[in-house]
Image (cartoon, grey):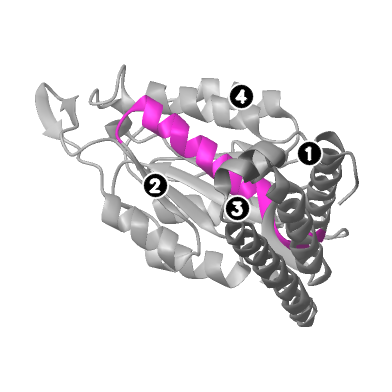
């Protein structure tokens, strides 16, 4: 939290002096009572004091003053504001290694299910596109608000050989650029899921540079475990996930990097990404919260004073 007009905090000085004055008055009152040495007689002739209750109205009143002063200082904080529009491209690895069963039932099916939930959870006004990639990359669905088109394309995906991560980023960038340039383009983001290294096509470094130049962040998800294998011509071939390569792409392209070793973890990753791309951070004034709290303490001061002492503070 920051204060846009901190000079108003100088008003806390008289509030502090008021608090000190109240404390001094209470000490003097206690000292005066102690001068009356016949405590037995004092207990009979003086009614029982209100104890701690007598301090409640004063404390509430001082808190009200302090909160109002902070409100005048115009506090502000960063808050998450939903985006009205955005373009999200989902780049989906359909290489043969996605058939590994280290994730139940296999990486491919679990990833499709998580991607479906991600698609269904995005705001309706977001443009969403799909780029499957293996030995090459192609735009299966250009950016659209038609969620069913993306879901249907996800259902039709099938696995192939090769992993062209760089080409997937380039294809996603071209799909984003294909949007109508006559209007102001909404912010764009690429979410790329893969379990392997780039084996063909453009390099990951080239793709990261191009995405950075165009101002399009690339968030990557390294999906799978180090123990994944696939059956290839009757023999088990290890297909460990390559996290470092995907992390490097994300860092160079200004996006986030995630790792997921199970279907549940992947779903949690997609939910987190949906939150980050679906909102923008803005600094907004929050003085009204302090003023509102101050008014509440003013009511507490008045109510307790009337209830316990039949007078206003």
Which secondary structure, mark 4? helix
The residue singled out by tag 4 in the image is 151
Whichever of callouts 4 and 3 sits on the residue coming sooner in the sequence is 4
The residue singled out by tag 2 in the image is 258
Mark toward the viewer: 2 or 4 = 2
For residue 159, say whether it is visible.
no
Q: Is residue 52 above or below residue 61?
A: above
Q: CA distance from mark 1 to mark 3?
A: 15 Å
User: Overall secondary structure of the magenta stretch?
Assistant: helix
Whichever of callouts 2 and 4 sits on the residue coming sooner in the sequence is 4
Q: CA distance from mark 2 to mark 4?
A: 23 Å
Q: Is residue 44 above or below residue 297?
A: above
Q: Residue at x 73, y 65 (%)?
A: 76
Quarter location, residue 124: top right
Quarter location, residue 159: top left
The residue singled out by tag 3 in the image is 189
Whichever of callouts 1 and 4 sits on the residue coming sooner in the sequence is 1
Q: CA distance from mark 3 to mark 2?
A: 15 Å
Which secondary structure, mark 3? strand
Bounds of the magenta span? Answer: 261-287
């Amino acid at each position: 939290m920051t204060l846009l007009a901190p000079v108003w905090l100088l008003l806390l000085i008289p509030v502090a002096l008021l608090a000190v004055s109240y404390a001094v008055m209470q000490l003097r009152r206690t000292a005066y009572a102690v001068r009356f040495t016949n405590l037995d007689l004092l207990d009979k002739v003086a009614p029982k004091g209100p104890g701690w209750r007598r301090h409640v109205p004063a404390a509430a009143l001082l808190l009200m003053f302090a909160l109002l002063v902070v409100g005048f200082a115009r506090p502000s904080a960063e808050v998450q504001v939903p985006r009205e529009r955005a373009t999200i491209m989902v780049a989906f690895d359909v290489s043969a290694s996605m058939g590994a069963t280290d994730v139940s039932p296999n990486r491919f099916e679990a990833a499709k299910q998580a991607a479906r939930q991600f698609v269904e959870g995005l705001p309706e006004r977001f443009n969403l596109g799909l780029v499957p990639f293996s030995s090459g990359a192609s735009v299966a669905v250009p950016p659209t608000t038609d969620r069913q088109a993306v879901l249907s394309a996800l259902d039709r995906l099938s696995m192939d050989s090769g992993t062209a991560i760089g080409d997937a980023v380039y294809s996603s960038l071209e799909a984003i650029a294909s949007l109508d340039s006559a209007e102001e383009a909404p912010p764009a983001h690429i979410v790329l899921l893969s379990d392997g290294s780039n084996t063909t096509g453009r390099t990951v470094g080239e793709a990261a540079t191009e995405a950075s130049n165009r101002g399009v962040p690339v968030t990557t998800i390294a999906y799978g475990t180090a123990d994944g294998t696939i059956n290839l011509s009757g023999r088990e071939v290890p297909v460990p996930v390559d996290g470092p390569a995907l992390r490097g792409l994300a860092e160079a392209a200004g996006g986030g990097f995630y790792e997921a070793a199970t279907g549940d973890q992947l779903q949690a990753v997609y939910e987190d990404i949906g939150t980050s791309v679906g909102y923008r951070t803005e600094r907004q004034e929050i003085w009204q919260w302090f003023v509102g709290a101050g008014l509440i303490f003013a009511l507490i001061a008045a109510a307790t004073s009337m209830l316990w002492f039949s007078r206003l503070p």
